[in-house]
Structures are given as structure tokens and as C-alpha cells.
Image (tube, rainbow, N blue to C red):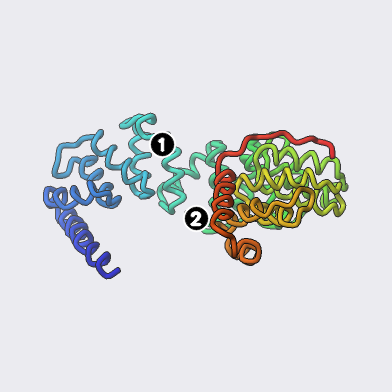
């Protein structure tokens, strides 16, 4: 550990010396200090080299070289480089294809990292009707990323984007209304926004609307509509919807009791990495509920869950799988590998 710190010190000293030389107008010396650091992957030095070539300081001005160094630093998340890259794009000094995005895209990235000039530009884009910028500002204010957290401002920008037909923004407004963030808490308003986003095919909105329909919150209780919404979200790949359907079909509380469908949805969610589904499905296989008992399958599922959510799976894994012999453990490992492989998509019956 101390060795790593000591190894980093020369690089820090060289960078500081490069900055000092730059501030004093010794651009050639700054270039010599920054170049090896930049080649070694230091984003600050890459930005500094870009600046030297951009301004023609110590070297002939070279847009292509400046652009290249800015982009290398920008791709590492260096906000100043992201902003300068956007400026080059905006002023026609670089192509969007070479930059891997338009000026607006790089301004958005820099704004997320708190670059105040980039935040200003994103506001200008959003104020001019750019729906993507409006949505992004909504997220930034909702999460406090790059700007001070402000649910009210988040709601305002999401509302502008949603008015232009943006489904993601409509979904975000539903979440804010349901939670009472930036807007008075209202399940009715939440349901309306979720319905709007769901109509545009937004899986999470379908899921949230289905939950309100199942519980009768903000809308009349409608299990048929709830089931259709859950299944649409689950078929679209939303793992939380797959897990919810499995749990509902398993419990049968206020929902059709169907262990075959519970197993099918648990299996889909387990293949998609849900530790909760893996643990619940393991229990069904261990106990032979709705299927033939299969301790090897159960242990394979618990091993998967143990890798990502140890606290969720460790007790069951210890009780069921703690004393496996070598042959059985090899079989468990093989089964677990099958779950890690991409699962073949299967269509489930819409009727129990």
C-alpha cells in the first residue's frame, strides 16, 4: 500500500511542475512534463496537452491533436475536457462522428459532473425546447447531480419534456407525484402520468401503473388490467415485474394461485440475475413445491444468489449445500453456469 502511494508521488510532482511552468508561460517545459503523463493515461495531463495544442502554446496550433487529447480525457470523465470537446464541436472544429457525439451530448456529460459552464449551456438547450436536455435537467435536479438538488425544478423540467411527448419524463413525473416530491402527493396524478408513459411502451411505467391498479390506489382496483400491465413489463425484460408476478402467483393472495406460472417467472427472473428470485426458486426446488424436488438445482440457485447478495442467501446455502460431496458440487457448478448463460426467451400463457 505504501509502495503505491510512493509510486504516485513522482507523477503528482511532474504534473504540478507542468502546471507551474504553464502558469509562468514556459509552455515548452509544460509540454515536456505533461506528455509522458498523458501517454500513461492521466486525464488531467491529457486535458492540459489538448489545451496547449488548442491554443498553440509552445507548439503550433493543431485542432486534430487538441481534439484527440480532449477526447481521451473526456472519455475518462474529465469534465473540463468534455466541455472543451463540446466547444470544438459547436464551433465546427471537429466532427460529431469523430467525437462520438454531438456538442450537446458532451455538454450534458460535463454538466453531470458539475461543470458550471456546461450546466449553463444545458439550460440554454433546454430553454430552447431540446427535450433531451429538459429530461436530463430533470434528472440532475431530482438527484442533485451537477446542480443543487431541487425536486421542484426537477418537476418543472420533466413537465416540459413530458408535454413534448417524452415517455421517460412522464414516468419520472409519476414517480414524483406518487412520492410527493416537487408536487403534492397524489396517487391519482401518479396514475395519470404512468398511464401516459405506459401508452408509449415504457416498461417501468407499466409496472408502476399495474401496482396501483392491483392495490386500487389512485385508480379503481382492476386485477385484470394489473395482470396485463405486469406481464407487458415482464415480457419487456423488467426483472422487478418478473419477480413480482412470480411472488403473486406463488402466494395467491388477492391473485390467482398458480405454481406453474410462479416457477416460470421465477426462472426468468433468476436467469436475469435477480437474487431474490434465485433464493425463492431455490426454496421451491428444495421443498419440491410445484415441481419435483431437486437439491442440485436449489444449490445452484443459492450459489448464484450468494455471489451477489450473500446476506440474502448465506443461511439457506449453509443449511442445504454446506456438506456436498465433490461429485454433487461439480453438478451444482454446472447448473449454476447454465443460469449464467443467456436464457432462451419463452412466452408464457396469459391465462392460468
Give the residue drawn at x 18%, y 58%. Answer: 14
Give the residue drawn at x 34%, y 33%. Answer: 91
Image coords of residue 140 (percent x, y): 53, 51
Residue 241 visible in the current orientation = no
Q: Are marks 2 and 1 in contact (CB under 8 Å)?
A: no
Up the image or down, 93 lies above or below 214; here it is above
Q: Secondary structure at mark 2?
A: loop
Give the residue drawn at x 14%, y 49%. Answer: 32
Residue 24 visible in the current orientation = yes
Image coords of residue 294 (percent x, y): 69, 51
Q: Secondary structure at mark 1?
A: helix
Give the residue number, with chain letter if any, for mark 2. Answer: 147
Image coords of residue 72 (percent x, y): 31, 43
Give the residue drawn at x 45%, y 39%. Answer: 105
Give the residue number, with chain letter if any, for mark 1. Answer: 103
Residue 161 lies left or right of residue 43; in this view the side is right
Amino acid at each position: 500500500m505504501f509502495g503505491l502511494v510512493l509510486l504516485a508521488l513522482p507523477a503528482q510532482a511532474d504534473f504540478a511542475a507542468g502546471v507551474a511552468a504553464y502558469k509562468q508561460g514556459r509552455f515548452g517545459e509544460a509540454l515536456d512534463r505533461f506528455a509522458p503523463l498523458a501517454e500513461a493515461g492521466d486525464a488531467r495531463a491529457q486535458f492540459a496537452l489538448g489545451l496547449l495544442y488548442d491554443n498553440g502554446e509552445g507548439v503550433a496550433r493543431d485542432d486534430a491533436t487538441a481534439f484527440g487529447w480532449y477526447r481521451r480525457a473526456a472519455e475518462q470523465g474529465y469534465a473540463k475536457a468534455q466541455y472543451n470537446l463540446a466547444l470544438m464541436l459547436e464551433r465546427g472544429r471537429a466532427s460529431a462522428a469523430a467525437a462520438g457525439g454531438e456538442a450537446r451530448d458532451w455538454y450534458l456529460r460535463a454538466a453531470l459532473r458539475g461543470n458550471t459552464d456546461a450546466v449553463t449551456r444545458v439550460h440554454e438547450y433546454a430553454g430552447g425546447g431540446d427535450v433531451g436536455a429538459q429530461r436530463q435537467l430533470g434528472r440532475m435536479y431530482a438527484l442533485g447531480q451537477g446542480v443543487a438538488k431541487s425536486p421542484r425544478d426537477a418537476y418543472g423540467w420533466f413537465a416540459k419534456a413530458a408535454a413534448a411527448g417524452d415517455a421517460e419524463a412522464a414516468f419520472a413525473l409519476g414517480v414524483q407525484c406518487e412520492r410527493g416530491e416537487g408536487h403534492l402527493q397524489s396517487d391519482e396524478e401518479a396514475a395519470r402520468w404512468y398511464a401516459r408513459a405506459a401508452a408509449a411502451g415504457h416498461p417501468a411505467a407499466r409496472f408502476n401503473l399495474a401496482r396501483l391498479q392491483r392495490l386500487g390506489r389512485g385508480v379503481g382496483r382492476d386485477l385484470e388490467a394489473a395482470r396485463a400491465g405486469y406481464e407487458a413489463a415482464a415480457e419487456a425484460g423488467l426483472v422487478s415485474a418478473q419477480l413480482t408476478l412470480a411472488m403473486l402467483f406463488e402466494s395467491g393472495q388477492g391473485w390467482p394461485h398458480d405454481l406453474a406460472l410462479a416457477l416460470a417467472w421465477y426462472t426468468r427472473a433468476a436467469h436475469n440475475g435477480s437474487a431474490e428470485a434465485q433464493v425463492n426458486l431455490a426454496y421451491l426446488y428444495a421443498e419440491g413445491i410445484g415441481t419435483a424436488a431437486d437439491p442440485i438445482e436449489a444449490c445452484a440457485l443459492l450459489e448464484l444468489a450468494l455471489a451477489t447478495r450473500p446476506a440474502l442467501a448465506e443461511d439457506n446455502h449453509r443449511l442445504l449445500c454446506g456438506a456436498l460431496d465433490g461429485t454433487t458440487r461439480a453438478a451444482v457448478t454446472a447448473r449454476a453456469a447454465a443460469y449464467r448463460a443467456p436464457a432462451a426467451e419463452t412466452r408464457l400463457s396469459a391465462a392460468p
